Amino acid sequence: MDAEEIEAGRSRWQARFDGAAKRGSDFRTLSGLDVEPVYGPGGDDPRMARIGWPGEYPFTRGLHPTGYRGRTWTIRQFAGFGNARQTNERYKMILGAGGGGLSVAFDMPTLMGRDSDDPRSLGEVGHCGVAIDSALDMDLLFDGIPLGDITTSMTISGPAVPVFCMYVVAAERQGVPAGRLNGTLQTDIFKEYIAQKEWLFAPEPHLRLIGDLMEFCAAGVPAYKPLSVSGYHIREAGSTAAQELAFTLADGFGYVELGLSRGLDVDVFAPGLSFFFDAHIDFFEEIAKFRAARRIWARWLRDVYGARTDRAQWLRFHTQTAGVSLTAQQPHNNVVRTAVEALAAVLGGTNSLHTNALDEVLALPSEKAAEIALRTQQVIMEETEVVNVADPLGGSWYVEALTDRLEAEAEAIFAKIRDMGRDGSMTSGILRGIEDGWFTSEIAEAAFDYQRKLEKGEKRIVGVNCHTASVDEPLEILRVGHEVEREQNRVLAARRAGRDQGAVDGALAAMVQVARGEGNLVPPMLDAVRAEATLGEICDALRGEWGVHSEPARF
């Protein structure tokens, strides 16, 4: 790009920047030096066609011309343990300490669509997240937290749609109509088959539910994002950064194809798609990954899927620091790891961020560890001045080379996935890759290669295979007692005894009848939730209709 084109781009950016709202803040260095809101080349630079300016296609440098001068990222701490009342107390602590949004962690029975008193739930209730059995639990979870004013992310995929319905009903009981809700539901079933393994049905019924949810939100819940396409769990399973980038965006393209197959307008539903990435410990590679992700998504949405508006081409993403990078050895070192990873996410332009607690490798985070994790973000936001300049590493020879390299590797993976399919679509290739175990084998190979390098000492982890001497003392960790499960089951039994069983049975039967046809399942599911049907009852009714999915053994 020649100097004249670059200057024209700078002028376009300046006009948008001048017309946008900015935070009232001191945008100077600690020494008092004024800094520009963005920096670019002073003359010719052929890279600028790929780099661009903040708020302008291909959005490599961010979605907004103001960067974080307009609005900082949302501090969204992932939390959930025990019962809804206990987790509600933690949420109020997070919000009171300056958190900007909530992110719900569910326990394993909830993630698998099982009630707390299901025999398969024994010993798991409340241990890795909060137990949610019915809409009354959702009422308690958000008691005193106005759902019309707070954004909430819910990390759940298999039973995501019935959990969403419980959230909507909890809002209704607060007097908040569904149309006012803003937040994110994960709902990403592709990554479950690829990495996390928390599915209920075969892929096709899950995709039917996701399509129904997309239609429902596009029509009546415009600010809500019904899909958060997750690379986090793919990376935590052992993938490389390039695999995380490619597999995640490929899944996103699959959901775009799902929306188009439903007759939805891409410019209407695409803004409801968001992403969830891992921020790992390789600082510059992670920054490059985030920048490449925005650029790839914008190009594919515009050139492949026909999106015309900027909002439909935007890749919005939440980031969580890498749980897999935390170590049980010398666990206080995890504070440093988390800070480095959080800074990479911020320099990569994340829209919201969760920082892991130092003790999460051992148990659910204690209140003190959760506060340190929250303060880590606030120190970055309030003290480091990284919010002053949009994409401050843009133009770095190293970062731009890494961005281009990750983009090229991702494109090669996209081509391979499409070639696996029967019709050249991304969806067909993903389904074939799931069926053949291709994704899991690729991730397993990457994880094995990294482990081998660790054991040879080619990759080093402080406190694990180098610098192992320590004065650390054992941590006091949060433990969820068995009384939580006993109390949850007692309350659940009382709810069942006190509800109108005829209304529950009728609502579930009506939902199953819709499942046998082609209607949207969200409205009858909402009716079942309003009647206090439990999560397990709703999921079991659909299991009875659609069956369950078991992954075939592979060697």
Image (tube, rainbow, N blue to C red):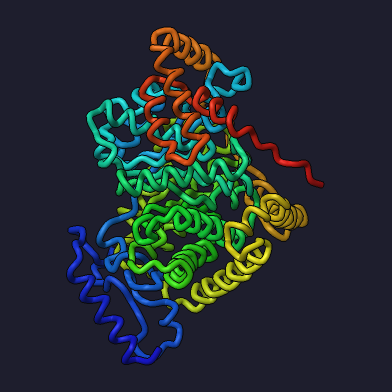
| 551 with respect to 190 (left or right) | right
Image coordinates of residue 181 in percent, x first then y, are: 29, 41
> In the rendered image, is residue 100 in sight?
no
Image quadrant holding the N terminus, namely bottom left
Would residue 338 appear left or right of 10 to someone viewing this image? right
What residue lies at 51% left-to-right and 26% top-to-bottom? 478
Residue at 21% across, 58% down: 23
Picture quadrant where residue 374 is located: top left
> x%, y% of residue 357?
48, 40
Instruction: Give whichever of 198, 329 is nearer the camera.
Output: 198
Give the number of callouts: 0
The answer to which of 526 and 520 lies nearer the viewer is 520
Query: Residue visible at 47% across and 44% down?
Result: 186
x, y percentage for residue 174? 25, 28
Q: Image height check: is 178 above or below 223?
A: above
Q: Residue at x 31, y 44 (%)?
A: 221
The quadrant in which residue 295 appears is bottom left
- Residue 272 in the image: above or below residue 541: below
* Front residue (pair 138, 475): 138
Q: Position of residue 313 (x, y in %)?
A: 39, 65
Relative height, residue 404 to residue 470 (above, below) = below
**Is 144 on the left or on the right of 476, as rendered?**
left
Does the rendering let one see residue 321? yes
